[in-house]
C-alpha cells in the first residue's frame, strides 16, 4: 500500500520540486507508522457473543432482591479483600478510582482514605448499589452502568478495579481498550476474574450425568477464560508492567445441591446463549451421585462427608504507559557478556568507583 502511494505521488508530482516530493513521501511514511502503532485489543482479538447479557442482568437483580443473598457472598467477600490488599501494596494515593461491576462494593468496602480519596461504584443492579458498602472516610459515587459498554471520560481515572465480573463479558477486547482509554497516564488496572478450572468438578459431573441419562452433553456451566488470554489482552491493549497470577480456592459442600443453590443465590447461574433451558431432576440426582462418587470425602472428626468445588482466580495488573515508568536500559549498553558467566568470580573481584549525586543521598 505504501509503495502504491509512492508511485501515485510520483506520477502526480512529476514536474514539481524534488524537495516537495520528498517531504510528501516522508509524511506518508510517518502517517503509516503512526497508524501501525495504534493497535488495539479489538484489532487483534475477535469478539465472541457467548453470554446473554440481558439474562445475566435479570439474574443479578433477582439475586440482589433475595433476602438470603448474604449466605452466598463468601467467595466474593474473600476475593474482594484479597484484591483490596493488593492496592495497599501500591504506595500511592489514588484521587479518582472506579470499581467496575462493584455489586455490593466487595473491594471498595476495604478502601482507606490514605489509599483512595474517591471511588465510583458501577454496576447494572440498582439494588446491589443501594446496599453497597464503602470504606469509612472515602468519598464515593454510585452509577448504574453496564461493565461491557461503560463510558467514562478519557484520561480521567487513576485506578480501575474489578473483582469477579469480567467472566460474564462478551467483548473482552473492547473492554480492555475502553479501560486503557479512560485511565490517566501511569494509571493502573487491577482486577481478577474466574479462570478455566473453576467448577471443573461440577462441570464433569454434569457432563457424565447427561451422557448417562440423555445420551449427549449440554453446557450447564458457563465457559471461563484462560490466563494466557488475559496476558494477551493486556499486551494487545497496550498495558505495560503487566502481572498475571493464579490463585485457587477449594470450598467443601455437603453435596452438589448446596453448591448449585449458592451459585443461584449469588446470581452466578449459567447465562450462555446455548444453555439448556431446564435441568431435569433425574440429571440433577445423577450428577450429585457422580460428583460424590468421584470427589466425595469423609471427615471422621466431624462425622460428615463433603464434596469439593474449585475456584480458579486469575489476578492481573496493567499500567497505562507513561515516561516516568521504569524502562529497560538501551540495547547494547551492557558491560558483561553472557559468554563470560563462567568468569563470574573474576568479574566480581574487579572494583570500580561510582559517582554519587545529591539525589542518591536522599
Image (tube, grey):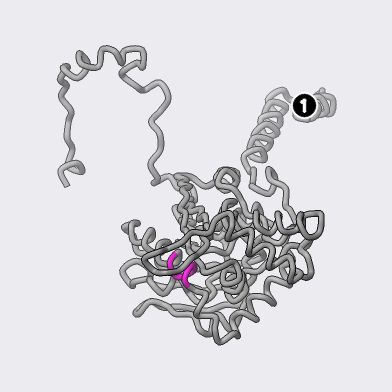
Residue appearing at x 36%, y 17% in the figure: 338
Magenta stretch, main secondary structure class: helix
List the residue tagged with mark 1: 6
220 is higher (above) or lower (below) than 106: above
Whole-percent x, y for residue 172 in the image: 64, 55
Magenta stretch?
A: 74-78
* Residue 259, picture quadrant: bottom right
At mark 1, the secondary structure is helix
- Neighbor class of circle 1 (other Cα within 10 Å; few <14, some 14-19, many 20+) is some
Whole-percent x, y for residue 140 in the image: 45, 78
Tell me, yes or no, whether the highlighted magenta stretch contains residue 332: no
137 is higher (above) or lower (below) than 244: below
Residue appearing at x 80%, y 54% in the figure: 216
Frontmost residue, 215 versus 113: 215
Whole-percent x, y for residue 17 in the image: 73, 25
Classify the position of the N terminus by image quarter: top right
Whole-percent x, y for residue 330 in the image: 41, 28
Q: Is residue 93 left or right of residue 103?
A: left
Amino acid at each position: 500500500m505504501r509503495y502504491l502511494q509512492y508511485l501515485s505521488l510520483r506520477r502526480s508530482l512529476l514536474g514539481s520540486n524534488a524537495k516537495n516530493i520528498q517531504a510528501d513521501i516522508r509524511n506518508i511514511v510517518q502517517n503509516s507508522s503512526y497508524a501501525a502503532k495504534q493497535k488495539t485489543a479489538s484489532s487483534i482479538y475477535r469478539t465472541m457473543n457467548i453470554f446473554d447479557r440481558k439474562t445475566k442482568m435479570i439474574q443479578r437483580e433477582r439475586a440482589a432482591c433475595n433476602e438470603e443473598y448474604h449466605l452466598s457472598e463468601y467467595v466474593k467477600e474473600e476475593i474482594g479483600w484479597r484484591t483490596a490488599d493488593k492496592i495497599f501494596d501500591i504506595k500511592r494515593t489514588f484521587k479518582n478510582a472506579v470499581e467496575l461491576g462493584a455489586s455490593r462494593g466487595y473491594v471498595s468496602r476495604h478502601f482507606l482514605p490514605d489509599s483512595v480519596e474517591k471511588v465510583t461504584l458501577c454496576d447494572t443492579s440498582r439494588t446491589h448499589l443501594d446496599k453497597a458498602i464503602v470504606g469509612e472516610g472515602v468519598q464515593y459515587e454510585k452509577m448504574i452502568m453496564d461493565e461491557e459498554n461503560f463510558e467514562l471520560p478519557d484520561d480521567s481515572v487513576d485506578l480501575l478495579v474489578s473483582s469477579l465480573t469480567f467472566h460474564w463479558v462478551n467483548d473482552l477486547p473492547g473492554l480492555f481498550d475502553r479501560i486503557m482509554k479512560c485511565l490517566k497516564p501511569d494509571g493502573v488496572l487491577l482486577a481478577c476474574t474466574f479462570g478455566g478450572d473453576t467448577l471443573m468438578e461440577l462441570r464433569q459431573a454434569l457432563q457424565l450425568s447427561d451422557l448417562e441419562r440423555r445420551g449427549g452433553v449440554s453446557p450447564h456451566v458457563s465457559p471461563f477464560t484462560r490466563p494466557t488470554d488475559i496476558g494477551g489482552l493486556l499486551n494487545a491493549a497496550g498495558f505495560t508492567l503487566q502481572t498475571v497470577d493464579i490463585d485457587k480456592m477449594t470450598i467443601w459442600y455437603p453435596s452438589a445441591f448446596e453448591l448449585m443453590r449458592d451459585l443461584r443465590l449469588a446470581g452466578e447461574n449459567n447465562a450462555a446463549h446455548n444453555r439448556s433451558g431446564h435441568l431435569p431432576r433425574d440429571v440433577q440426582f445423577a450428577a450429585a451421585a457422580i460428583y460424590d462418587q468421584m470427589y466425595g470425602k469423609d471427615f471422621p472428626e466431624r462425622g460428615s462427608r463433603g464434596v469439593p468445588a474449585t475456584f480458579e482466580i486469575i489476578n492481573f495488573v496493567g499500567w497505562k504507559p507513561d515516561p516516568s515508568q521504569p524502562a529497560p536500559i538501551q540495547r547494547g549498553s551492557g558491560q558483561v557478556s553472557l559468554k563470560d558467566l563462567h568468569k563470574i568470580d573474576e568479574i566480581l573481584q574487579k572494583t570500580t568507583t561510582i559517582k554519587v549525586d545529591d539525589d542518591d543521598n536522599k
